[in-house]
Image: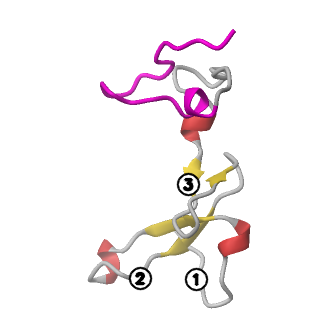
């Protein structure tokens, strides 16, 4: 039976991604479920598996030191993208 309680230590009003998808929360990583740890692709919005996001330079926020990354899925990776390097 699917629990309707908030599974993750998040802010009030937060709805767990697992609950939204109708799945039982997997809390094997701690107090946040596995699906809530996943990224959404910033180009198409699909949920990216926990270890499959690709980080590319966003190149849109002013000086280089202020720029960050976008998390994109494999299908949205462009040849013109530059991989984000910490």
User: Which corner quadrant of the image does residue 9 belong to?
Assistant: top left
Pick the front one: 81 or 42: 42
Task: Give 75 or 59, whichever is nearer the viewer.
Answer: 75
Q: Residue furthest bottom?
A: 80
Which SS class for mark 3?
Answer: strand
Q: Kindly indicate the quadrant of the structure image that contains residue 15.
A: top left
- The residue lying at 55 percent from left, 70 percent from top is 43
**Which residue is under mark 1?**
82
Query: How has the structure been colored for display?
Result: secondary structure
Q: Which residue is mark 2?
A: 59
8 horizontally vs 75: left or right:
left
**Residue position marked by numbered label 3 in the rendering:** 40
Of labels 3 and 1, the one closer to you:
3
Q: Is residue 58 magenta?
A: no
Residues drawn in magenta? 1-21
User: Any mark on residue 33, and which?
Assistant: none
In three-dimensional space, the C-alpha distance between marks 3 and 1, rounded to whole angstroms, equals 19 Å
Vertical comparison of 5 with 46: above or below: above
**Element carrying mark 2:** loop
Residue at 66% across / 83% down in the picture? 78
Q: CA distance from mark 1 to mark 2?
A: 9 Å
Q: Which mark is in front, 3 or 2?
A: 3
Q: Is residue 83 above or below residue 34?
A: below
Residue 36: percent from left, percent from top? 55, 36
- Asked if labels 2 and 3 touch by Cβ distance under 8 angstroms, the answer is no
Residue at the left extreme of this rendering: 62
């Amino acid at each position: 039976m699917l629990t309707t309680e908030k599974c993750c230590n998040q802010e009030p009003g937060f709805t767990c991604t697992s609950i939204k998808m109708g799945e039982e929360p997997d809390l094997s990583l701690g107090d946040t479920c596995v699906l809530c740890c996943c990224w959404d692709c910033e180009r198409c919005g699909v949920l990216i598996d926990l270890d499959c996001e690709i980080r590319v330079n966003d190149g849109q926020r002013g000086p280089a030191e202020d720029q960050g990354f976008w998390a994109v899925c494999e299908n949205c990776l462009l040849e013109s993208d530059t991989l984000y390097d910490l």
